[in-house]
Image (tube, coloured by chain):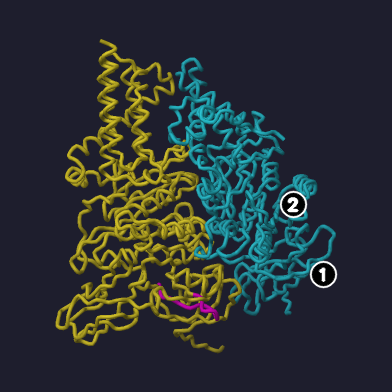
Amino acid sequence: MKEEKKTVSKAGVLRRISGPVVTAVGLEAHMYDLVKVGREELMGEVIKIKGEDVIIQVYEDTAGIRPGEPVVNTSLPLAVELGPGLMKSIYDGIQRPLSVLVDRMGNFIERGVSAPGLDRTARWDFKPLVKKGDRVSAGSIIGEVPETRSIVHRIMVPPNVKGGVVKEIREGKFTVEEVVCTLEDGTALTMMHKWPVRVPRPYQEKLNPDIPLLTGQRILDGLFPIAKGGTAAIPGPFGSGKTVTQQQLAKWSDAKIVVYIGCGERGNEMTEVLTEFPNLLDPTTGNPLMERTTLIANTSNMPVAAREASVYTGITIAEYFRDMGYDVSLMADSTSRWAEAMREISSRLEEMPGEEGYPAYLAARLSEFYERAGRVRTLNGQHGSVSVIGAVSPPGGDFSEPVTQNTLRIVKVFWALDAKLSQRRHFPAINWLNSYSLYLDILNDWYAANVSPEWNTLRAWMMEVLQKEAELQEIVQLVGSDALPEEQQITIEIARMIREIFLQQNAYDKVDTYCDMTKQYDMVKAIRKFSDLAYAAQAAGVLPQQVMAVKAKSELPQIKFIKDYRPELARIMDSMEKEFNALRAGIS
Amino acid sequence: MKEYRTITQIAGPLVFVEKTEPIGYAELVNIVLADGTIKRGQVLDTSDEIVVVQVFETTAGIGRDSGVRFTGETIKMPVGREMLGRILSGGGKPIDGGPEIVPEKRLDITGAAINPYARHPPEEFIQTGISTIDGMNTLVRGQKLPIFSGAGLPHNDIALQIARQSKVLGAKESFAVVFAAMGITKEEANHFMADFERTGALERAVVFLNLADDPAVERIITPRLALTTAEYLAFTLGMHVLVILTDMTNYCEALRQIGAAREEVPGRRGYPGYMYTDLASIYERAGVIHGMSGSITQFPILTMPGDDITHPIPDLTGYITEGQIVISRELHRKGIYPPINVLPSLSRLMNLGIGEKHTREDHKKVSDQLYAAYAEGNDLRGLVAIVGKDALSERDRMFLEFADLFEDRFVRQGKDENRAITQTLDLGWELLATLPVEQLVRIDRGLIEKYHPKFRGQRQAGAAQPQSVKG
């Protein structure tokens, strides 16, 4: 018998191909090494090692690849390039710029094309913020680049570089690969560095999330706020307005940087985002929103393994901007597609499945991901945050499925989208009874100090009325609304006003699409005023029908659509009081 | 080409071949039977030791003595302008007695994903002439809008009416229909064919027929052949292509069948875990591309098993497509055609294709108001069943009546009735006028004064009353 000596090296050969999962032999590999598969050098990642078999997930289509083709290990983990040029970029799941791919291979995505995440030819204006002889350490800001009109990109010493004393630092226009700073020990720093996507970037400490991330969406800011550095989930059956809500958040939330991950979603929807964002003006700076946005688009028909990676690519970019001291909001639409990508890869690996075929490590992966959110003190001592808002698409709208359940165990805010509400065209179709925010207590102080000391009481009042309405509706379902006591008929009416005036918000209306806290406060106050007058009138003997017919009530919703609403609101409030006085005068 | 006689196992549609040279993943395979018949298949899994082939036809007649030839290339579809007017089998072979198709090009049937950056947002309004679609679930060019139906409902008639009446306002461009039937009965197929012939649509159509008694596995490639053809017509020849895929439920059943034969770990209800990705690779082949004149608009039809919209097939479809048109058994029983239930129906791209630039400025608000009023009236029906009509308030009674009126006037229309969008909107206003003006909270004052029949009469005396046109 001939004894064949097995050798392993940086280059192995393919043994088996089954969709996006391939097996190589004779390859020296470590987990999550990046490899080049086949003669076309498709990008792949090592996801399992079993004896001499190395199992690889491939980020591109594997049709036509044969056993026996070479596999080369780069011995590097999957990493993203971080540096000027991230803003305004549109990437696929493994940080290939989609615009470059169009230039290289036309309108359809072919395979075997690699493209660097950052443009190598662009020259950026680098302005040093440290000088020769200064001591810098990991995370220190050494200079800045005006990346877009909205964003100053702070160049940092990479977290994995020890630092030292600056020997030379240059000012001027450089590409991302040119050395801008040299340290005494010879370390050369460029404006760009790479960071492995599966490793969270380090920081000094996590801070309390006690500042709200304002979104201009009344039901969110008003009733169920998320904190800067917080986590939220939006689960919703299809057609319940999940995507619109996500996009509203991206457009209007007061984070400095937006990272939007379209993970396994519709191509046309991504296109909508791609065409809309550059035209949308940022309400705070007046510049296009795109100037502070990075988009990652891995649509449902793009390779499944790249979909799995897209979420990590996105959060790493978000953490990078956090480290500069910015507030970043990251939207992942949808984490269910990400979980399904895990399931698909797992089933190709013939792993023992957990619940509903999802891998047993689903919960662990989800919590690792959400844990990368947070408000932190960065290595350079600044405060930055990453808020993560993940959409979940529960099959059949069933919230008991594993992805929703595992997500809810981790996130602090739950915005329950409700298909019934969206059928009634109540938008945003967020159910006020099922949603919750665990940040309320911690944010109370902020609202009291920055909106009004009354605000927290008003919010509690709104929730109470809505809760009461839900109970009364059960009775109405049985006996009809006329059978209720007069006082309760008014409660139902007040609740209707809260729903129709405060909670409903038209994302497509120029004015109503964004509502600041002052206007929100004014609106609630107006409803509260009506409520007080209505109960008082009813107690004085005015009939509920008369109360409901008060003209000011039907005029109130119009203020949503008026930009300078204050004069009109004052007029309505004034006539409201007069009307009620007249009604009461009619009784006595 | 080398022929192997090393089949070791045959299970369902799968054939296992041993001791081959390196074979490419997804390659096309020909299996030669003793009598010379050739059956086609595709490589599903390839390794040094064993190659798994999925056969697109029945495996009857294949034995361990059959020969296996690997073609060395992935499945390609010969395409050309000549295909218009032709009827092909679900496997792409002409079955209308005509000559073989002379290909202008041979294209890979899996098709590559359109780069999202190259897509142009769909925004051209397509008028289907059906009020419930145009008015409230507007279709735009490049959209994929499935019809969710149930067994025994008239989804085929609706699909045909859409195919017949669809047009882009004020445009005269070359237009084609690609029709792919998967597992439908001969009778249903005849119905479609007769209508295509009656209206002369056949000469602008390419028809793929996989009938109920054709091999189930062939259904896996039928929609891909159809979409490859559509892509050629749209993005090479610059036509606007409407693709009708019926019935996607049969496609998914075939997918499950293969999954089971491969002994895969099943997902929900036994469907494979990768069904979402698989369906996406079909549905996502719709759209408009920057700088290209053609487009693909998809109308997949599926029957929901047990009318259950949460069943994995409609559920996963709804997550990929841009909305859905839901056919209601209840409306059908009431004798209303087309029985489209607008409440669960949705067009996600509607807002891109309506409004001043495309249809009319009041479109969105009218649609929202109709929805809200109908939803409210519909909810009240449940209440009436318990407490009786008398217990309702005046306001509630009006909404209840509105719901009936809406179904009777707005939803109901003839099979050949082609309503212009302005007719649809005016009809909407006419119905909304039965409610007191102050109940129209979703429409702003300005539009009410401009379009509400009551005010219109005051402002422009003698203006024509809006009416629906029968015919």
Residue A354 in the figure: left or right of residue A167: right
Vertical placement of residue A174 versus A248, above or below:
below
Q: Quadrant of residue A522?
A: top left
Determine the residue positioned at 46% across, 16% down: B391
Residue B318 visible in the picture: no
Chain letter for mark 2: B
Q: How many marks?
A: 2
Neighbour tally class for label 1: few under 14, some 14-19, many 20 plus, Cα within 10 Å: few
Residue B299 placement, left or right of B374: right
Instruction: Residue B254: give x, y in percent of width and height.
Output: 65, 54
Give the chain coloured cyan.
B
Q: Quadrant of the C terminus of chain B?
A: top right
Specify the segment rendered in magenta: A32-42
Chain letter for mark 1, please: B
Query: Which kind of residue does numbered mark 1 sit on?
Result: Gly
The residue sitting at 56% across, 68% down in the picture is: A108
Say which colour chain A has: yellow
Identify the disc placed on residue B211. 2
What is the x, y in percent for residue B96? 82, 57
Circle 1 sits in a helix, a strand or a loop, which is it? loop
Q: Position of residue A282 (x, y in %)?
A: 34, 56
**Residue B97: image x %, image y %?**
85, 59
Q: Amino acid at mark 2?
A: Leu
Task: For the N terminus of chain B, give its image quadrant.
Answer: bottom right
Instruction: Name which of mark 1 and mark 2 comes first in the sequence.
Output: 1
Disc number placed over residue B36 in the picture, else none: 1
